[in-house]
Image (cartoon, grey):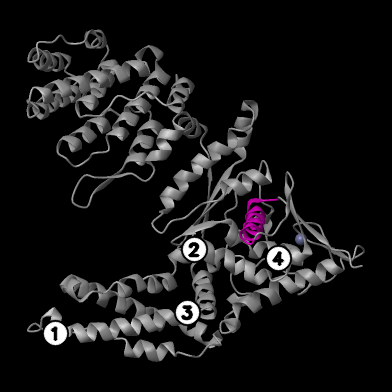
């Protein structure tokens, strides 16, 4: 009986680790079982059967929605929902824009090289492209006059889409998209990225160059062979393909290495690696996550499980690289937390964040070491900060404020959030912002921050909630008295008093507001006036309630976070 060989890949420097994560991701995506040790993964050689299919399937699953193929195909929704009565100038413009896009893609070099590979010749997409034309309409014509042409062009587009969606065509064109958008950012010159192979089937080229050699090699590793693989020390018998490979095909990673970790420092042309390592390096693009030419890999190598987990990202079509990076900090925190505190500093020191900027030809990779202070801030307010990552607040016609960035920047710079809170309240009163619970969060984060510096300036979260409650009570009383219209004026006056830290003006407004109801100002405010930080925290909490934000019990998480920071 034939014994089944096992392949073990052990963690090494960041680049190799990216390759290992890539292999693991590809196996995961294809439901292939493998073993995860502390610092290695191990799988049977059978995992490499049809690996070329698994390889591309992984990338296609992850990045499909970012491809030009998808941009063309998703227009089917518009076509299928076409209704004559919906057609107006704007609609027509939209169709023409799409026609332009489709035409440009169909005749691009990348698509042309795909047509050569595709066996299904049912349609000639270059001919289709010529027949697909923008809808022209002169000034005298109405939209209705060009309806027949609109229908004709939409019909052509639908035909093109149906062809693009057939299995084989999709598989080849998507692979072309992926190669161009993702894989070519990391390596070049060999296999399907060799210029001479541009018109050959990429799946086969991958198998021939990366998989077949590996399978032959593991069948007979010659223990007495003369040479050793530069990376893994496995024996190699010859310094030529397909027994050994060099590293020159991996894009520009040799120049700007971090000081200690990489042995690629002295990389030269006469460095040889075994077919297994060659295979691992082909999977580097699958270890990174790439958005619009920018890639991210986090080398948190305390264990293979951590390494894989911290590099798993669910991407949406509109995910930005910044958001990806922010989210990564949280998953780093998540993974660190499971370890003992004593190990924390050491582990943080060993985590590298590697960024790829493919537009930078000379030095595409940059390295960041994590800041401990940043991680502590993240950790202390994890849940609240995390929920803000994608929140954008419109502050001008085209100006947006990224809430998460605003809060975190102030935290990093050691500043309080009062100016931001004030700005958000102004937007609220001008009816441009209604997510009050974020103001609530920022007040709490800020209170944590203040308490972290000087404990006596911190307000207990219960007191914050009480103030919110007083604000809400006041609102309800005014509403019951049919005096709701007065609330905005009161709010503006309070807001201005808080901005200028003018306690007497704040109290005056408050006294008048309560007097109107024949009620007494809650004593809590009189207490709080003594300290400007406390005064502002209480004041803004009150204002929040006055806007109608209901008093909620702090969730357990918030309380826990308060304690961490307190
Ligand atoms: Zn090797």
Measure the C-alpha gap from mark 2 to mark 3. Answer: 17 Å
Residue depicted at 45% across the width and 79% down the height? 164
The kind of secondary structure element at disc 2 is helix
Pointer 3 residue = 110
Q: Alpha-carbon neighbours of circle 2 within 10 Å: few (<14), some, or many (≥20)? A: many
Mark 2 or 3: in front is 2
Q: Which disc number belongs to residue 278?
A: 4
Residue 477: x percent and y percent?
14, 20
Measure the C-alpha gap from mark 3 to mark 4. Answer: 26 Å
Rendered position, 386 above or below 174: above
Residue depicted at 69% across the width and 71% down the height? 50
Residue 466, image quadrant: top left
Query: Assess mark 3: CB under 8 A from ligand 1?
Result: no
The kind of secondary structure element at disc 4 is helix
Taking the image as shown, residue 98 lies to the left or right of residue 433, namely right
Measure the C-alpha gap from mark 4 to mark 2. Answer: 24 Å
Pointer 2 residue = 63
Q: Alpha-carbon neighbours of circle 3 within 10 Å: few (<14), some, or many (≥20)? A: some
Taking the magenta stretch, the answer to whether it contains residue 19 is yes
């Amino acid at each position: 009986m034939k014994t089944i060989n096992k392949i073990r890949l052990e963690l090494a420097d960041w680049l190799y680790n990216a390759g290992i994560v890539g292999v693991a991701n590809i196996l995961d995506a294809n439901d292939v079982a493998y073993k995860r040790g502390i610092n290695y993964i191990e799988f049977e050689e059978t995992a490499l059967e049809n690996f070329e299919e698994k390889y591309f399937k992984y990338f296609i699953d992850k990045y499909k929605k970012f491809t030009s193929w998808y941009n063309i195909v998703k227009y089917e929704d518009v076509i299928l929902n076409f209704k004559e009565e919906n057609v107006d100038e704007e609609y027509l413009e939209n169709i023409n824009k799409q026609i332009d896009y489709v035409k440009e893609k169909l005749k691009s070099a990348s698509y042309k090289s795909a047509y050569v590979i595709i066996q299904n010749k049912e349609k000639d997409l270059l001919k289709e492209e010529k027949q697909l034309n923008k809808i022209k309409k002169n000034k005298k014509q109405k939209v209705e006059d060009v309806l027949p042409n609109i229908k004709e062009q939409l019909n052509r587009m639908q035909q093109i889409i149906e062809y693009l969606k057939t299995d084989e065509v999709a598989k080849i064109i998507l692979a072309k998209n992926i190669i161009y958008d993702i894989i070519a950012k990391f390596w070049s010159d060999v296999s399907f990225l060799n210029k001479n192979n541009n018109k050959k089937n990429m799946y086969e080229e991958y198998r021939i160059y990366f998989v077949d050699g590996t399978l032959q090699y593991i069948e007979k590793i010659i223990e007495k062979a003369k040479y050793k693989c530069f990376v893994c020390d496995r024996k190699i018998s010859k310094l030529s393909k397909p027994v050994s490979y060099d590293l020159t095909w991996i894009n520009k990673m040799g120049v700007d290495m971090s000081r200690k970790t990489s042995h690629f420092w002295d990389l030269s042309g006469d460095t040889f690696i075994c077919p297994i390592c060659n295979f691992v390096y082909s999977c580097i693009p699958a270890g990174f996550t790439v958005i619009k030419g920018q890639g991210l890999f986090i080398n948190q190598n305390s264990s293979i499980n951590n390494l894989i987990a911290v590099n798993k990202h669910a991407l949406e079509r509109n995910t930005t690289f910044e958001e990806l990076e922010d989210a990564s900090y949280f998953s780093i925190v998540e993974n660190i937390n499971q370890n003992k505190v004593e190990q924390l500093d050491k582990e943080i020191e060993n985590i590298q964040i590697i960024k790829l900027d493919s537009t930078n030809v000379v030095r595409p990779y940059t390295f960041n070491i994590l800041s401990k202070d940043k991680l502590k801030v993240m950790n202390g307010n994890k849940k609240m900060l995390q929920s803000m990552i994608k929140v954008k607040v419109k502050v001008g016609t085209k100006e947006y404020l990224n809430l998460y960035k605003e809060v975190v920047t102030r935290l990093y710079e050691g500043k309080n959030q009062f100016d931001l809170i004030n700005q958000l309240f102004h937007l609220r009163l001008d009816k441009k912002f209604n997510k009050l619970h974020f103001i609530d969060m920022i007040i709490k984060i800020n209170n944590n921050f203040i308490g972290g510096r000087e404990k006596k300036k911190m307000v207990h979260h219960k007191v914050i909630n009480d103030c919110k409650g007083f604000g809400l009570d006041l609102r309800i009383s005014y509403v019951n008295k049919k005096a709701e219209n007065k609330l905005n004026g009161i709010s503006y006056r309070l807001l201005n008093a808080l901005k200028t830290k003018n306690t007497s003006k704040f109290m005056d407004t408050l006294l008048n507001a309560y007097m109107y109801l024949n009620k007494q100002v809650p004593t809590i405010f009189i207490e709080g006036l003594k300290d400007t930080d406390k005064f502002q925290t209480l004041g803004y909490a009150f204002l929040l309630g006055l806007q109608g934000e209901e008093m909620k019990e702090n969730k357990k998480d918030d309380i826990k976070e308060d304690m961490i920071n307190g």
